[in-house]
Structures are given as structure tokens and as C-alpha cells.
Image (cartoon, helix red, strand yellow):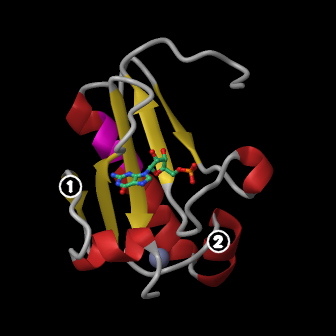
Amino acid sequence: MTDCLFCKIVSGDVPAKIVRESAGALAFRDINPQAPTHVLVIPRDHHPTVAELAASDAGLLAEVVREAHQVAVDEGIAESGYRVVFNTGPQAGQTVFHVHAHVLGGRGLNWPPG
Ligand code: 5GP
Ligand code: ZN
């Protein structure tokens, strides 16, 4: 999609601090981090929400989640604990409609989130 911010990160038209790459997914640091580790994991293909990705390519969703765990391993937070969040829809705070997993960790995380 030409006017999608995260498609432009996939194509290299918008720069990002990339931390991991796999065949189907890309992981990069959030521009406005909310925790010591705050990385976004996205599929290279455009899917608006996690629900649509699950319906159309469940294998790719699994790759995104595997990569999210590998980010946590690379960042040294897999043992201490981390959170994977897919904000879905406006009331949940989704602002970019190219599905992305937030990987958050490196500090205590409140539950339930606000
Ligand atoms: P959402 O609110 O849709 O769940 O998450 C979108 C995330 O994308 C936000 O945490 C926001 O900080 C991040 N973000 C927005 N624009 C950019 C950008 O240009 N580069 C990077 N790396 N992150 C961005
Ligand atoms: Zn996109």
C-alpha cells in the first residue's frame, strides 16, 4: 500500500532502527518507546489488523509471534518477562493500520494496562 507508513518502512522509503529481519517479518524500534525495550514486529505484507492477518495468513501471524519472542531473547528480557500487544481498532489505540506486535519489557509492566 503506497500510503501506509509501515509499508514504507518495509520498502526502505521511511528509515527505521531495524533489529531483526526474517523472510516474512521485520522488527524495528518504536519511535516513541514506552519501556526500555519497545520494538514493533510487522509482517512485510500489508494486513490492517491481527484479526485479518489471522484469517488470511495464520502462518505469517505465527512468524510475527516467533520473531517477537526472538526480539525478547536478543534484548535479554525473555526470562524476566515481556509483553506482546496487538492494539486492534481505534478504542484500543491502534493508530497505524498495518498490523504490528508491540514487544515491551525491561521494566515492571502494570496489569491491567490502562
Ligand atoms: P499503535 O498505536 O497503532 O498500536 O502503534 C503504533 C506505534 O507506531 C506507536 O507506538 C508509535 O510510536 C509508532 N510509530 C509511529 N510512527 C512511527 C515511525 O515513523 N517510526 C517508528 N519506528 N515507529 C512509529
Ligand atoms: Zn502497510
Kindly state the secondary structure of the residue where label 1 is placed: strand
* Residue in the foreground of this view, choosing between 79 and 102: 102
Residue identifier under label 2: 54
Q: Residues within 10 Å of mark 2 (few under 14, many from 20)?
A: some
Does 88 sit left or right of 100 as displayed? right
Q: Quadrant of residue 30?
A: top left
Residue 56 among those drawn in magenta: no
Kindly state the secondary structure of the residue where label 2 is placed: helix
Q: Residue at x 47, y 76 (%)?
A: 4
Q: Position of residue 99 (x, y in %)?
A: 55, 65
Q: Residues within 10 Å of mark 1 (few under 14, many from 20)?
A: some
* Residue in the foreground of this view, choosing between 14 and 100: 14
Q: Which numbered disc covers residue 111?
A: none
Q: Position of residue 58 (x, y in %)?
A: 58, 74
Q: Assign the C terminus to one quadrant of the image.
A: top right
- Magenta residues span 68-72
Name the residue at the bottom extreme.
2
Q: Residue at x 34, y 44 (%)?
A: 31
Q: Residue at x 64, y 67 (%)?
A: 49
- Magenta stretch secondary structure, dominant: helix
Q: Amino acid at mark 2?
A: Ala
